[in-house]
Each structure stands twice: as structure tokens, then as C-alpha cells.
Image (cartoon, rainbow, N blue to C red):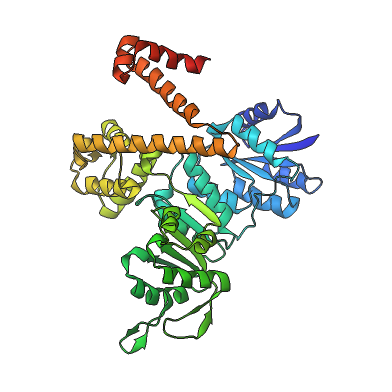
């Protein structure tokens, strides 16, 4: 029988974790003292440790380090009472098998424990620790939605490796902050982090900017790759680079050397490459504007940052973060945000994503005279423009869901799946229209532009 140890200094919280796992055939032991658990660990290790993040007097991250030191390859699942980007990153960086927000219980914990105790010993996802280190200002990657928690975990996992990373997402979602978080949690944190906006320079100038050779004041400039030696270079908007520049980047990544433009002298270089794009590189490859070999070289690890409109639950958290930072910088006494203002922020489409939200908070704080941010302090788009933005956002979300269904069913080997997906969408529309019209089928059918019989048919699809 597999042995599972639960570490939680709060007895009622520990009982909740025991109840979640009690239906599974495990030998469960509860520890309320980290010191006593670690002492027992040296006499015989369990198969798995479940540790609460936010332990009194110590923390799961400290426990992780000790379990690794004393217990070797024992997997550890961290359960967080209050999720945080830094907590998730540090937990995964220190070798946690998984990091779970408490609200994912019970199914999330059951699934994580089953996977951790599978035949592979749960160690496939574990990474080595680069040692303690602080993350730079996390800014736009703050968030508690499931999508952001997964990003935080991924950052912690990949930080200790030298694998190339491709970050993709809309403008303003915080792609550079993801790159900085990876760098400042890695073994390269003491070395330079160099960011380059590839879209800001034309091809020839970008080439010399990256690799040097441009003469300024009688001297050749040092390229950005050289400045990033032993550190990390972040290539933002890499989709906008020329094929010639892409070839030089590929040479660095594959061979570990580069040539200055106009010379044949080769220089060895050790640098980690993190790239970002707001455009589809697949489409750029179809247009013969991006090299296939570079794409796969970059896409060892891929991080997708969802737009703010797809994680609206994070808007209050981000707004409070930006408010705290802005009022401190401006030295203004702002006590908070009114419920009406929060509602307005949550309902806005945010086409500029997190960057736009930050600027909106900055604007509101600068002009506020009452000490509390209200709707009138914010400069938002008009009702008509807002409606257009929200409609576009809704269409984008529908498209994303359809793509996910299509991909999932295709990978499962299904065929002829178009009609099924369309039927699902039509069924959802029918039920939502019926709810919107207070259960009146005549009005619901008229709203959708279909007959009442067709409406009834679509309503019955979900029941059958």
C-alpha cells in the first residue's frame, strides 16, 4: 500500500486533505510539525508528501528543499491556501510535483496524487533547484485564474533549465515579464538579461544590433548577444525578423557561436534565448517569412498568455497591484476602488490587455481628488466602441473554444466531427435564449431566427 504523508500545521485543514484522499487506497499519516516529519523522513520515506503552502513557522518551499535533501526522490504536492505567482514559481522551481490552489479540491488533489504515484514514480515533471532567488516585479503575470497558475508553475519548471522558450500572446499581456521571471529564477540570474524589440529596427540595423559590427565614433559596437553572454537574451516580436537574421540566430542556438556582420571571425557564446511573438509563426512559415527550423528550435517550451478578457477574474487582483504601486510612486493617499468602478473594469474588453489596465489605473490615480477611485476617474471607451470590443472579444472566445474542441477530437482520432461541434454550439444558444426570455419558447425562437420546432429539437439534444 502506498504511503502518503500530509503536512499541515492546521488540524482542521489537515482533516480536509485526509477526507479528500480517504476514498483512495493509501496509507495516510498526518503531521502537524514540519520538524517531526522531516526527522521521521530520515528513518523511512513515504511514497508521497502533500504539504500545505503557508505553514505556520515554516513554508512548503523550505520543506521541499529538506525533503529533497533527506528523502531524495519523494514527490511533493503543494496545496496553497492562497495562490500566488511567486509561491507557484518557487514551489515548482524547488522540485514540487505539482502546485494546487485549494479551490481545486477535491478532484485536483486526487488527480495529482494519482499521477504522482503512477508507475514512473511521479518524477517526470520534477526539476532541479537553482537555489534561492527573487523574482523581479511580476507585474502582469500576477493572477489566480487556473490559466495563470499553470503559467506560474511552468515558469518554475523551466527556469532551472537552459531550454529555449517561445512566449506568445497579444500585445500588452506581459510577454517580457514572463521572460524576466524565467531569467531571475534561473542559474543565470546573476548574469545579464538583455531585451531586444525586433520590430523596432529594420533588417540590416537589427543584424548589427544583435551581433555587433556597427561603427559608432570610430569604434565597432558590441552586439546584444555579446552583452547577454552567460545570461539571457529576450527577442521580442521575433516574427518580424528577416530570414537572414533568423539564420544567424539559428546558428547561435545550434552551434553556440556567431559571426559579426562583414567578418568571418567566429566567437563562442553561451546565452539562453527566450523569444516572443504576438503573431502566428505558423502563418508566417506558410508565407515563407519564417524559418521552420528556427521555429522548432525556439518552441522547445511554449508559453501562451491569454488576453485579459479571457481571465476577467484576475482584473481586481491586477488593479489592486497597480493601484498600490502607483499611489506609492505618486505619493497619493488613495484608499481603494469603489464596487461600481470594479464592475466597470471587469466588464470592459481591455483590447490593450494588462498594459492598458495599468495605464488606466495610472490615469485614475493621477487625476483623483476624493481618495477613492470611482468610475468617473477612468477614461474608458464609449458605449458603442465598448460594445464593438466586447463583441469582438466574445467572437474570439467562441473561436477559441471551437478550436479546442476540434483539436481534442481530432487528436482522439474522431472523424466527421463538424456536425457534432455545430450541434453543441446550437444547443448552448437554444438554452441561453430560453433562459434570457424567461422560458418563453416563442420569444426564444424569434430571438434566434428559427422555428419553435427547431428550438425544441435543439433543446432536446442535450437531454438525449
Closest to the observer, 453 or 399: 453
Q: Nearer the viewer, residue 448 or 92?
A: 448
Please provide percent x and percent y for residue 222.
41, 80
Quarter in which the N terminus is drawn: top right
Residue at 68% across, 49% down: 124
* Residue at x-position 63% and y-position 48%: 96
Q: Quadrant of residue 117?
A: top right
Quick check: 452 above or below 340? above
- Between 81 and 265, the one lying in front of the other is 265
Name the residue nearer the viewer: 162 or 359: 162
Residue 162 x/y as whole percent: 57, 63
User: What number of labels is visible?
Assistant: 0
Q: Please determine whether, in this image, residue 433 is positioned above or below residue 263.
A: above
> Can residue 101 be seen in the rendering of this structure?
no
Residue 67 screen position, x and y as percent: 70, 49
- In the image, 96: left or right of 425? right
**For residue 154, side relative to residue 444 (left or right):** right
Instruction: Check the image and name the residue furthest to the front.
Output: 416
The residue sitting at 61% across, 43% down in the picture is 98
The reply, left or right, for residue 206 in relation to residue 302 is left
Residue 116 appears in the figure = yes
284 shown above or below 198? above
Instruction: Give the image location of residue 66, x and y in percent.
Output: 68, 52
Residue farthest to the bottom, as pictured = 218
Amino acid at each position: 500500500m502506498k504511503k502518503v504523508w500530509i503536512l499541515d500545521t492546521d488540524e482542521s485543514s489537515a482533516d480536509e486533505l485526509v477526507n479528500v484522499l480517504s476514498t483512495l487506497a493509501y496509507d495516510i499519516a498526518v503531521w502537524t510539525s514540519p520538524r517531526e516529519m522531516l526527522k521521521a523522513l530520515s528513518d523511512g520515506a513515504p511514497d508521497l508528501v502533500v504539504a500545505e503552502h503557508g505553514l505556520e513557522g515554516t513554508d512548503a518551499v523550505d520543506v521541499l528543499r529538506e525533503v529533497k535533501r533527506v528523502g531524495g526522490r519523494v514527490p511533493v504536492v503543494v496545496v496553497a491556501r492562497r495562490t500566488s505567482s511567486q509561491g507557484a514559481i518557487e514551489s515548482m522551481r524547488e522540485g514540487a510535483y505539482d502546485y494546487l490552489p485549494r479551490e481545486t479540491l477535491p478532484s485536483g488533489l486526487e488527480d495529482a496524487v494519482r499521477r504522482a504515484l503512477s508507475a514512473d514514480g511521479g518524477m517526470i515533471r520534477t526539476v532541479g533547484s537553482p537555489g534561492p532567488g527573487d523574482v523581479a516585479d511580476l507585474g502582469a503575470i500576477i493572477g489566480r485564474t487556473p490559466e495563470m497558475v499553470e503559467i506560474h508553475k511552468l515558469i518554475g519548471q523551466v527556469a532551472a533549465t537552459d531550454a529555449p522558450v517561445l512566449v506568445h500572446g497579444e500585445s500588452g499581456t506581459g510577454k517580457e515579464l514572463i521572460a524576466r521571471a524565467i531569467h531571475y529564477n534561473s542559474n543565470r540570474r546573476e548574469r545579464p538579461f538583455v531585451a531586444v524589440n525586433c520590430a523596432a529596427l529594420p533588417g540590416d540595423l537589427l543584424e548589427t544590433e544583435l551581433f555587433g559590427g556597427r561603427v559608432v565614433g570610430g569604434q565597432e559596437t558590441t552586439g546584444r548577444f555579446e552583452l547577454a553572454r552567460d545570461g539571457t537574451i529576450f527577442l521580442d516580436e521575433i516574427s518580424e525578423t528577416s530570414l537572414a537574421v533568423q539564420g544567424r540566430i539559428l546558428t547561435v542556438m545550434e552551434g553556440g557561436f556567431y559571426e559579426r556582420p562583414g567578418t568571418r571571425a567566429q566567437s563562442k557564446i553561451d546565452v539562453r534565448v527566450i523569444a516572443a511573438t504576438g503573431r502566428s509563426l505558423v502563418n508566417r512559415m506558410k508565407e515563407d517569412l519564417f524559418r521552420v527550423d528556427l521555429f522548432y528550435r525556439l518552441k522547445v517550451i511554449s508559453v501562451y498568455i491569454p488576453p485579459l478578457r479571457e481571465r476577467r477574474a484576475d482584473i481586481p487582483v491586477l488593479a489592486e497591484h497597480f493601484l498600490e504601486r502607483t499611489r506609492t510612486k505618486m505619493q497619493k493617499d488613495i484608499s481603494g476602488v469603489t464596487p461600481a468602478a470594479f464592475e466597470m473594469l471587469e466588464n470592459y474588453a481591455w483590447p490593450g490587455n494588462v498594459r492598458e489596465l495599468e495605464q488606466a489605473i495610472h490615469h485614475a490615480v493621477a487625476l483623483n481628488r476624493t481618495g477613492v477611485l470611482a468610475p468617473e476617474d477612468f477614461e474608458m471607451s464609449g458605449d458603442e466602441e465598448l460594445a464593438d470590443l466586447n463583441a469582438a472579444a466574445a467572437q474570439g472566445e467562441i473561436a477559441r473554444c471551437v478550436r479546442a474542441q476540434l483539436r481534442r477530437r481530432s487528436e482522439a482520432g474522431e472523424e466527421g466531427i463538424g456536425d457534432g461541434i455545430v450541434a453543441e454550439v446550437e444547443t448552448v444558444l437554444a438554452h441561453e435564449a430560453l433562459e434570457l426570455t424567461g422560458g418563453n419558447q416563442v420569444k426564444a425562437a424569434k430571438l434566434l431566427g428559427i422555428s419553435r420546432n427547431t428550438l425544441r429539437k435543439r433543446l432536446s439534444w442535450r437531454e438525449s
